[in-house]
Amino acid sequence: MPQSQVVQLADPAEFRAAVRAADGELLVKGRGEFQSMEVIRVDLHQLWMQRISDKLPRIIQATHHPGRAAILFLTHSAQAPVHHSGVEVAPGEIIALHDGASFHHCSEAPCQVAAMSLTLADFAAASKAIIGHELAPGTETRVIRPDSTAMARLMALHDKASKLAMDGAAELTYPASALALEQDLVRAMVACLAEPGAATKVARGHAKVVARFEEFVEHRRYEPVYLAEICTAIGVSERTLRTCCQEHLGMGPIHYLWLRRMHLAHRALLGADADSTTVTQVATEHGFWELGRFSVEYRSLFGEPPSASLHRSQH
């Protein structure tokens, strides 16, 4: 049954539950009050669509669910480029994810990203019907630049479907009209992938280093750690780790560790019982021992003091 949903996120911690077909985490890295992120989801008969709009610089760390052929692209030609796993992606280009891909998606400016996916079987059947042979999603994530006319049509159709969802239009609930829209979208998607221009493979070597770094971080998520310790544990030099993190995350490893712990503390405060938990407890449990500095940096990053987040959890 075709359906749509428009979700306004009031906090970065709500991102994981709002996004389809991926396990993701949002880290806001720009200082300032979090402004509501919008997630538009449209599920047609076979095609899943999403559009994510945000205003602050951020990192999305995500793993694409296996079994679906998925693409991502920027929705407006005037947008600033983003970095996807260390590769710059500009408007007019498509990120074709490989099955089960893990990635970092970084922006430095207001950003709107569109996503589309089909099951592998549906994608193979659709491409065979449209162009006469099956398209394989590939074993590596690629950034491609399709023909400009084909890309413009895909962007326009995705925009139309998103606006119908925002307006609560009946076209998305009537099976016949939803199917017609879906067929147009799938044709446009296949057209962009069938004869792409030059393709760039996302660098796997540095991605593997970042993946080992993330695994280390997950095991030591609350603890302050030192760069030499990290490099020894994952088997790379400090220079290599700094280069990989700068490419994939837009920042050095120590700053990224600090940012993750700040977001973990933020989530802990929002989920805590203010009658039995203190800001000091949460801060120290997440490795922040300079409480005055923690409070100042927390307010700068999240737009409110940690005590306000703690008491907001009661409402």
Image (tube, rainbow, N blue to C red):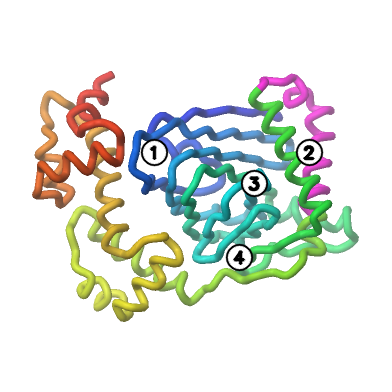
What is the three-letter code of the residue carrying label 3? Answer: Ala
Residue 141: image tag: 4
- Give the vertical position of 108 relative to 301 (above or below): below
The region drawn magenta spans 167-190
Q: What residue lies at 78% left-to-right and 56% top-to-bottom?
A: 192
Cα gap from disc 1 to disc 2, whole angstroms: 31 Å
Is label 2 or label 3 in front?
3
Measure the alpha-carbon separation of dots 3 and 1.
25 Å
For badge 2, the amino acid type reads Glu
- Asked which secondary structure carries label 2, the reply is helix
* Residue at the image position 75 percent from the left and 19 percent from the top: 170
Which comes before the other along the chain, label 2 or label 3? 3
State the residue position of label 1: 12
First-in-chain label (4 vs 3): 3
Residue 187 vs residue 95: left or right? Answer: right
Closer to the chain start, of discs 1 and 2, is: 1
Q: Position of residue 305 (x, y in %)?
A: 21, 32
Cα distance in 3D space between marks 4 and 3: 24 Å
**Residue annotated with mark 2:** 182
